[in-house]
Image (cartoon, rainbow, N blue to C red):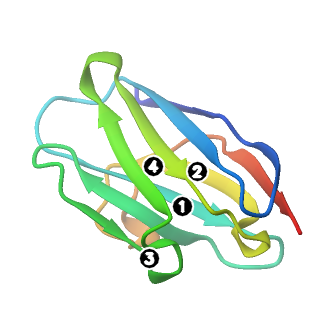
Amino acid sequence: QVQLVESGGGLVQAGGSLRLSCAVSGVTTGSRVMAWFRQAPGKEREGVAVIATNTGSTRYVGSVEGRFTISQDNAKNTLYLQMNSLKPEDTGMYFCATGGGGFVLRSYKNWGQGTQVTVSS
């Protein structure tokens, strides 16, 4: 059974940084894609960053390019999202997900419970 547990969210001032973590268990070996999504109040969930865990190839949504970095630690079975130069519009619930592809929301089979990020102006 796949289990994803996010942590690291919180309240931060604009311009600050946070690092989100996603502890992963129960994922089968082999190539897979892992991603971070976020959902602001009243808005649809959107893809933020995705990584191909076998190649390390990454992709970002344009609004976070150059500010966010997705990475993985295979030894710890943990996915990270380093978020720098945070803006109020980055506020939302952040979810990690696996079992899908790219930023196609409905393709992802496994989701964590989310961690809240709030950026004050």
Q: Secondary structure at mark 2?
A: strand
Image coordinates for residue 74, horizontal then vertical, percent: 25, 25
Q: Are marks 2 and 4 in contact (CB under 8 Å)?
A: yes
**Comparing marks 2 and 3, which lies closer to the viewer?**
3
Q: Earlier in the sequence, mark 1 or mark 2?
A: 1
Q: In the shown orientation, is residue 85 left or right of residue 28? A: right
Q: Which residue is mark 2?
A: 95
Residue at left 53%, top 80%? 63
Q: Secondary structure at mark 3?
A: loop
Disc 4 residue type (three-letter): Ala
Numbered tag placed on residue 61 in the rendering: 3
Residue at left 50%, top 65%? 67
Q: Are marks 1 and 2 in contact (CB under 8 Å)?
A: yes
Q: Secondary structure at mark 1?
A: strand
The number of discs equals 4
Q: Secondary structure at mark 4?
A: strand
Q: Nearer the viewer, residue 69 or 76?
A: 69
- Residue 113, picture quadrant: top right
Estimate the spatial distance between the alpha carbons at disc 1 and disc 3, rounded to whole Å.
Answer: 10 Å
Q: Are marks 4 and 1 in contact (CB under 8 Å)?
A: yes
Q: Which residue is mark 4?
A: 97
Q: Nearer the viewer, residue 104 or 79?
A: 79
The image shows residue 121, relative to residue 117, as above or below, that is below
Image coordinates for residue 120, horizontal then vertical, percent: 88, 62
Q: Which residue is mark 1?
A: 37
Estimate the spatial distance between the alpha carbons at disc 1 and disc 2, rounded to whole Å.
Answer: 5 Å
Residue at left 82%, top 78%? 42
Q: Are marks 2 and 3 in contact (CB under 8 Å)?
A: no
Estimate the spatial distance between the alpha carbons at disc 2 and disc 3, rounded to whole Å.
Answer: 15 Å
